[in-house]
Amino acid sequence: MRHEVRFSGFGGQGIILSAVILGRAAALYDDKHVVQTQVYGPEARGGASMSAVIIDDEPILYPKVRDPDTYVIMSQQGFEKYGSNPRKDAVMLLDSDLVHDRPSCPWVGIAATGVAKKELGREIVANIIMLGALSSATPVISGKALEKAILDSVPKGTEELNLKAMKRGQELGSAGGSS
Amino acid sequence: MQGNIASAEGALAAGCTFFGGYPITPSTEVAEHMAARMPKIKGSCFIQMEDEIASMAAIIGAAWTGARSMTATSGPGFSLMMENIGYAVMTETPCVLVNIQRGGPSTGQPTMGAQGDMMQVRFGSHGDYSIIALCPSSVQECFDLTAKAFNLADRFRTPVFLMADEVIGHMREKLEIPDSVEIVRPKTLPEGMLPFTPGPDGVPGFAPFGTGRYTHVTGLTHDERGYPDTTNPARHDALVRRLVSKIEDARHEIADYTIVNEDAEYVFVCYGAPVRTVKEVVDKRKVPKTGYLQLRIVWPFPEELLKRFPKCRAFIVPEMNLGMIVREVGRHVKIPVIPVSRIGGELHTPEDLIEAVKIAESTT
Amino acid sequence: MRDEWFRADRLPHIYCAGCGNGTIVNCVLEAVSMTGWDRKNTVFLSGIGCSSRAPGYILTDSLHTTHGRAIAFATGVKMADPSLHVVVFTGDGDLAAIGGNHFIHACRRNIDLTVVCMNNHIYGMTGGQGSPTTPLGKTSTTTPYGASETPFDLVDLAVAAGANYVARWTSFHVKQLTEAVLNGLNTPGFSLIEVRCQCPTSYGRRNKYREPVDYITHLKAHAILKDKWESMEKSGQDMPADSFPVGEFVRRARPVMGVPDEA
């Protein structure tokens, strides 16, 4: 099974880190072939950033994602630049607090930024909520692999917060999200 | 793991103990990784120099103490290194440069991939010379070829270049790190031999500083003692021809390549990131009548390999520049050679290459 | 002792008759032979220019590098193998123009090098062009109507940038110069010894010091000992035209780089 996943948002949301965590989860803990790439501009904060992951049972040759089956979109600008023209059978997870438009393909709204801020007290974990939702709402990655990859990747002392964010995301994802 | 980090790890596995560098996108992760790793390795030194001119100077100085030394840069930084690259060539200093190519000219596209420095690496410093350039197309090759670059540098006593690109340098994929890598250090200078008297392969033995051989090293045209002799035409002719031929004469022996479908009628000649698209087209989609030659060592150019495709009707050369190595291919064959040029930072798509095959079919 | 350090098979040398560089090389070798250093572990480096030919006449490992870059090369040598003693010969153009950035950064790092700058105020090798130390009003092939740019003070530069040892003498002050070089060699960290010297061929000829002795006499007459210079400054005296202070300007123990580990 092959998945092409595209993440987009603004610099500072952890868009590239999300793809790195997903790639690590699939490569090291789901034993898949993985290639992770990104497009970024000069801004470290703001702007529209994009990262992508290909997960496949076979070796991956052409490394760029061109026609994703799965999207994780975390800003309106990111939606416009990288998410406005999905294929019909794609699935899009979007941060319903920050993305105003809705795509033509099936989608799941996750109030990640709001939940991160109000329930967890740290806006920074919104991307982990999105990853949690990805693991429950789509077949892209197993929850177990994701959990291990998150623990590998986040700063020491923040493991509990991040796992909480992941679990909250999984709940929101299985509930089918909000509008 | 990221290509840039894999390259740094490949260097460390090969015993690189000196890194001099200057931050520049998209190569910076190489320096950052060395800065984190080297202080924990006894006898190793990471130093951030004041610019790329100084970085190149420092790694040459370090190499003359016998250390395996390296720098990493991109775009404008590579241009600044040209002066001392020529010095390393003339003084036969083994060292490794990693160039994570980005869009140029000038500051161009710092965060986007390109292969626009392929002629600069070969001809960019003034005067006649030759170098060795390796091009990885995967994270694994970033590791393997960086380690290999050190052996080639030592064997031929020349600067060796890992000509990667932003696409590969910033891509993450699985890397398998071997327990150990092959390490071949330079021949030592035999007792009684002058420091620049060549061996049978055209390469002199090496006597690093501190070994009591009192070597004088100069960028001026010099005799076998290393003493300047700048007005004798025969001296200069013999020295520079030797510097070129010690590398060019070994080009087929050191060639590192993959050939797929020798019976192909349309053959891609590729290196670096576009190899990925070529493999997608030939290996995976199995577009009929196609094959490829992947070069992991682009310079010196192993032109004999082009003869390995007896049924070839046209060579197709996809590059992330406006046509560089395509000229080298064209120089050696009498059949059509078709460039597929892509600049702007995006890799060729499989459709780009399939289209090129169609054009080749219709014109040959 | 000094003779042991000479590469006799390199003679004749390229320096003009009356050039100040030979005197300076002599003083440096005298100082080096006083350190008791092993020739095997001593490396001389240089950039480009007349000064930079000096290492070629010395029987040690030596690196004659590119214009202005000697200190950057030396940084690589010293950091890769701190057990080596590293000395750099340079000139005013090499050090202060094309190599100015490497110079101040090596001072900042306070890397353990001794740099001897032969300052003859001119690009001698290329035939007498103005340099960053050509005094105001002096003639060179690129300042035919007199230099109009304010020159650098190399000593002030090194002190401000953080070097641990800084001294200035002239090719007349042979004894003091030798002692200053020895102090520089023995001081951990970056040492600069500026030596004002004559270039009768390219500088003297255009500036009324045609005979070598003319400029040595000028240097002797205009070099004022640092202490005297400072007291003159304090008392508000006018400084004599073309005069400059000589002596030891700084000797300190800022943190250094490139010295062997204690262990």
Image (cartoon, helix red, strand yellow):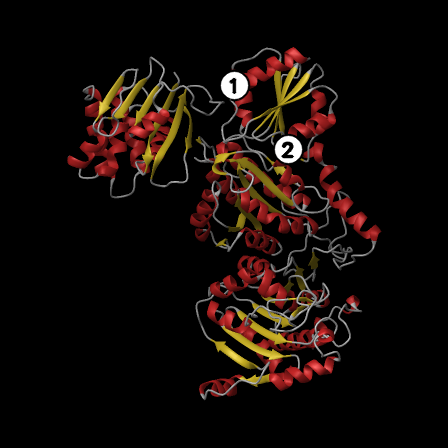
Q: Residues within 10 Å of mark 1 (few under 14, many from 20)?
A: some
Which secondary structure lies at badge 2?
A: strand
Which quadrant is home to the C terminus of chain A?
top left
The three-letter code of the residue at mark 1 reads: Pro
Pointer 2 chain: B
The spot of residue B45 in percent (x, y) is 50, 54
Same chain under badges 1 and 2? The reply is yes
**Chain-order first, disc 1 or disc 2:** 2
Front-most of C118 and C214? C214
Query: Which of the numbered marks, if any, corresponds to residue B298?
Result: 2
Mark 1–mark 2 Cα distance, whole angstroms, equals 23 Å
Residue at 20%, 34% (x, y): give it.
A116
Q: Is residue A179 left or right of residue C110?
A: left
Q: Nearer the viewer, residue A114 or B148?
A: A114
Q: Quarter of the image holding residue C222?
A: bottom right
The location of residue B26, given as percent across then percent down, is 47, 40
Residue occupied by mark 1 = B350
In percent of width and height, residue C31 lies at 62, 77
Residue B181, relative to residue B207: is it above or below?
above
Residue closest to the eye, B205 or A61 = A61
Vertical placement of B351 versus B169: above or below? above
Given the image, what chain letter belongs to the residue carrying mark 1? B
Q: Where's the N terminus of chain A, which quadrant?
A: top left
Asked whether, in this view, residue B33 is left or right of residue B136, the answer is: left
* Crowd band around label 2 with a 10 angstrom C-alpha radius: few (<14), some (14–19), many (20+): many
Residue B255 occupies quadrant: top right
Tag 1's secondary structure?
helix
Which corner quadrant of the image does residue C240 belong to?
A: bottom right
Asked if disc 1 and disc 2 are in contact, CB closer than 8 Å, the reply is no
Residue C10: tell me if it is visible: yes
Q: Nearer the viewer, mark 1 or mark 2?
A: 1
The three-letter amino acid code for the residue at tag 2 is Val
